[in-house]
Image: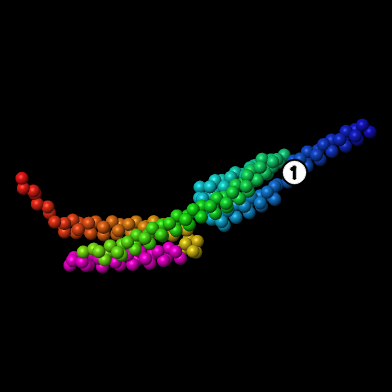
């Protein structure tokens, strides 16, 4: 009777050990983390907060590696992996908010650049009218006028890209366009200043 009791206790103990060893893989947590990461990617985190998104991917990789390590063990413990997965989910959700904020910053930056380009180009058109129209100057001004028209076209295209949400490409475009418009502005002002300087009468020296 005693032997049967001991056998029964041993069997129960073994069953308890087996149940402990067969801890269920945290599939729900894995799915939640994967969904959160995908939502962050869809929001544009991969493009607009690139370094943060790489860190998020690394965190997800670390969590999955922790799970794989436990899967190879007889006594599996997924508590640490669950904590990591919860961290991934939260971080991914924060990145969605951070991405949206970054997009707004870019929209404001692009809008300001477009306004500056437009103002510069309007000034450039006035300067062209004031610039000297000599034989050589006429052909140069014609080329500058073509560049001014190209800048106007770039502004229109930039506005269309902005409306379509192409923020990074349009940011690159407006930066280059602004440099060009500013360069023309400085060149025209320099030419006009030199011509005006030549027109000023030279003051004769006063007699003692």
The span shown in magenta is: 133-160
The answer to whether residue 140 is magenta is: yes
Q: Residue 144, relative to residue 82: is it above or below?
A: below
Q: How is the image coloured?
A: rainbow
Q: Residues within 10 Å of mark 1 (few under 14, many from 20)?
A: some
Quadrant hosting residue 194 = bottom left
Q: Nearer the viewer, residue 21 or 176?
A: 176
Locate residue 55 relative to residue 7 in the image: left or right: left
Query: Residue pushed farthest left?
Result: 208
The answer to whether residue 65 is magenta is: no
Q: Residue at x 66, y 51 (%)?
A: 32
Q: Residue 25, relative to residue 6: is it above or below?
A: below
Q: Nearer the viewer, residue 7 or 34?
A: 34
Majority SS type along the magenta span = helix
Locate residue 131 relative to residue 87 in the image: left or right: left
Query: Is residue 68 in sight in this rendering?
Result: no
Locate residue 80 relative to residue 100 in the image: left or right: right
Q: Nearer the viewer, residue 82 or 175?
A: 175
Q: Residue at x 50, y 61 (%)?
A: 165
In what quadrant of the picture does the N terminus appear? top right
**Element marked by disc 1:** loop
Residue at the disc numbered 1: 22
Q: Estimate the x, y position of residue 46 in percent, counting from the top left.
A: 52, 53
Quadrant hosting residue 131 = bottom left
Q: Residue at x 12, y 54 (%)?
A: 202
Q: Estimate the x, y position of residue 155 in percent, counting from the top left.
A: 40, 64
In what quadrant of the picture does the C terminus appear? top left
Q: Residue at x 39, y 56 (%)?
A: 175
Q: Estimate the x, y position of residue 156 in percent, counting from the top left.
A: 41, 66
Locate residue 159 relative to residue 189 in the image: left or right: right
Query: Is residue 155 in sight in this rendering?
Result: yes
């Amino acid at each position: 009777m005693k032997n049967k009791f001991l056998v029964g206790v041993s069997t129960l103990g073994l069953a308890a050990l087996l149940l402990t060893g067969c801890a269920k893989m945290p599939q729900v947590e894995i799915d939640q983390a994967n969904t959160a990461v995908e939502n962050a990617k869809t929001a544009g985190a991969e493009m607009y907060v690139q370094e943060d998104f790489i860190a998020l991917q690394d965190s997800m990789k670390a969590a999955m590696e922790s799970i794989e390590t436990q899967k190879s063990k007889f006594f599996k413990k997924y508590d640490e992996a669950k904590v990591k997965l919860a961290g991934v989910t939260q971080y991914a959700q924060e990145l969605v908010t951070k991405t949206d904020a970054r997009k707004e910053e870019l929209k404001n930056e692009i809008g300001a650049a477009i306004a500056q380009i437009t103002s510069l180009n309007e000034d450039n058109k006035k300067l062209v009218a004031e610039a000297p129209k000599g034989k050589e100057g006429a052909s140069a001004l014609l080329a500058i006028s073509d560049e001014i028209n190209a800048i106007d076209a770039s502004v229109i295209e930039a506005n269309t890209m902005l409306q379509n949400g192409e923020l990074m490409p349009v940011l690159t475009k407006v930066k280059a366009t602004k440099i060009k418009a500013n360069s023309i502005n400085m060149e025209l002002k320099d030419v006009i200043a030199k011509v005006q300087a030549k027109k000023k009468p030279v003051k004769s020296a006063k007699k003692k």
